Image: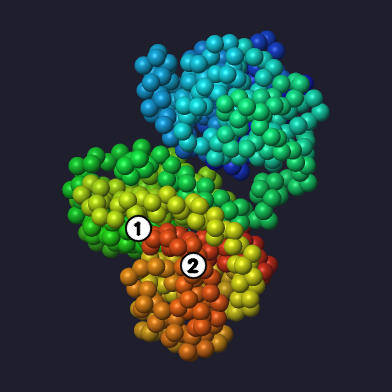
Amino acid sequence: MCGIIGYLGSRDATSILIDGLRRLEYRGYDSAGVAVLERTGVQSVVKRAARVETLVEALQERMPEGRLGIGHTRWATHGRPTQVNAHPHTDCRGRISVVHNGIIENFEELRAELRRAGHRFASDTDTEVVPHLIEEYYRGDFLAAVRQALARIRGAYALVMFCLDDPELLVGARLNAPLVVGLGEGEYFIASDIAALLPYTRKVLVLGEGEIAAVTPLGASVTALDGMPAPTRVLHVSWDTEQAERGGHPHFMLKEIMETPEAAANALRGRLDDQGRVHFAELELPDERLQGLAEVRLLGMGTSRHAAMVGEQLIEAWAGLPARAQDASEFRYRPALVGPDTLVVAVTQSGETADTIVALRQARQQESATVAVTNVVGSTIAREADGVIYLHSGPEIGVASTKTLVAHLVSLGLLALRLGELRGVADRRQGLVRELRELPALIRQVLDDGPRLAELARRYAGYRNFLFVGRGLGHPVALEGALKLKEISYLHAEGTSGGELKHGPIALLDRDTPVVAVCTEGPSWEKLLNNVHEVAVRGAPVLALVPRGERALADVATDVLELPRSGELGSAVLATVALQLFAYHVAVGLGRDVDRPRNLAKSVTVE
Ligand code: AGP
């Protein structure tokens, strides 16, 4: 998730691009760059592998002077955050400049084809294929070449681009990534979000999926990929800057929960082929090494440890390989009984959690194969592990992990499938692949139930203690539901497995201690129903999360929240999202600072 901005008008483009990039920096901040068509007819491209202010210092040495330009602030997906990988990217002759947000799934295949045609690439990015592909098709009509190029691209993109030969044309295109056109007085902007445009205009044209905007001094026209005119939707925006950064939501946490379908789709994108086989571009461990594994350890902290616990169950069930999730901070103080036939998976959103870094280093000393599953390209853990699976979720600003947890669950599901594939475990495979592919749409259905979750949260926000209970994959979901609630609402919440309930936690229950029962589908469903009966007869209010249409708890639970039906992993993901929304609404109801809860940091970089 990067920030992009383009300008065409009569003012100084460079200053407008800098201002836009400052406003967009929250979308990505590992590198930044601009390309400006100068009055002299040449194009200046300036980039830095650093924050926007470092780019500004570089520009101040010589400000490019022009009226047309594009800018980008990057959150790396393919290719480390280096100057050469920073956007804009250009074609071989440096005449076409492009900035991009999204992931181009078939970039390796396109790059190989373009190389064979004589194109030379400077970066490791997926984006760089775009200017070269346009160059390949360019015969004097830039827009036509853009259309031909886009027809070859699979994946997600918001693109803004221009060509030196067409100094009065700025082009934007979108597919599965947001892009808006700002309509000013005799000037036009194209940006990844409204926050960048607010000082200049509040008249905004929202591009639809697969649409292209061609902006000239005479106006903006919108067409579909095939060139047919598309209906335009012009909005008047009344948001202030902060609201705009949050996409109109009151908190980043809510914005990020709403981005979960996209995060799940990004984690899947390009990784499942038509036969349902799994491909990880950056997982550089040879198949032979993965085939010879005797066990898998998954290490993480907090929410990432809960993701690791889900991964543990999936790897055992889907790949038939012994697996164990561990608290990374404990792993490092115990005898490291891992070796070359152990795969150690570091599960971490930030890639900078000190406990997980140290545990990973210890595993490397024991010559274990190591993989990082992380959101941050170029983070310490991504650099030090043998292989990486990136989440591709874009920055997560709220301290509470939300969309990245779901991306972790999806990615660990893919890893389990891949390990199963290498070990010849084929049963249920097609069903599991279908389950993963259906997830983004099912998550959307849970989000659509937001008002019901808000109402439930209002009813439960008056309690001071909560017990979350689940079995199978529902157990880590229950632990995470409790963690999310306590970290942002400061209410006491505990999670337990259904089996453990009678061994102690049940003593806590009375009519002032509600139980949140995560009744996900799975082999211990009947046992979990028994648990709900046990807690209900002790007078505890019960909020039960059940598959849609399930009536078994209708007369037992105080409240029942129905979730879309899916497989075991799918149900766990859907319950996770519902509990994030529940925690969010409880915390908002109590007036908590949900994006910056007390005593917590987004990334815990000390042990
Ligand atoms: C979860 O909401 C917290 N932000 C916290 O538990 C977090 O998951 C933990 O600190 C691990 O962070 P990481 O994923 O960046 O390693």
State whether residue 74 is above or below residue 404. Answer: above
- Residue 327 appears in the picture as rendered: no
State whether residue 97 is above or below residue 495. Answer: above
Quarter of the rendering occupied by the C terminus: bottom left
Q: Position of residue 588 (x, y in %)?
A: 65, 65
Looking at the image, tell me whether mark 2 or mark 1 is earlier in sequence order: 1
Picture residue at 54% right of the left edge, 55% below the top? 444
Name the residue tied to disc 2.
548
Report the Cα–Cα distance between label 2 and label 1: 25 Å
State whether residue 583 is above or below residue 81. Answer: below
Quarter of the rendering occupied by the N terminus: top right
Give the colour scheme of this rendering: rainbow
Q: Which quadrant of the figure has residue 34?
A: top right
Residue type (three-letter) at the residue carrying disc 2: Arg
Contact flag, marks 2 and 1 (Cβ < 8 Å):
no
Q: Position of residue 256 (x, y in %)?
A: 57, 52
Residue closer to the observer: 1 or 344: 1
- Residue 145 appears in the picture as rendered: yes
Q: Residue furthest bottom?
A: 538
Name the residue tied to disc 1.
311
Q: Is residue 468 left or right of residue 308?
A: right
Picture residue at 70% right of the left edge, 30% below the top? 189
* Total numbered labels placed on residues in the image: 2
Q: Is residue 311 left or right of residue 443?
A: left
Residue type (three-letter) at the residue carrying disc 1: Gly
Eye-nearest disc, 2 or 1: 2
Callout 1: helix, strand or loop?
helix
Callout 2: helix, strand or loop?
loop
Q: Is residue 29 left or right of residue 356?
A: right
Picture residue at 23% right of the left edge, 52% below the top? 425
Q: Position of residue 604 (x, y in %)?
A: 48, 56
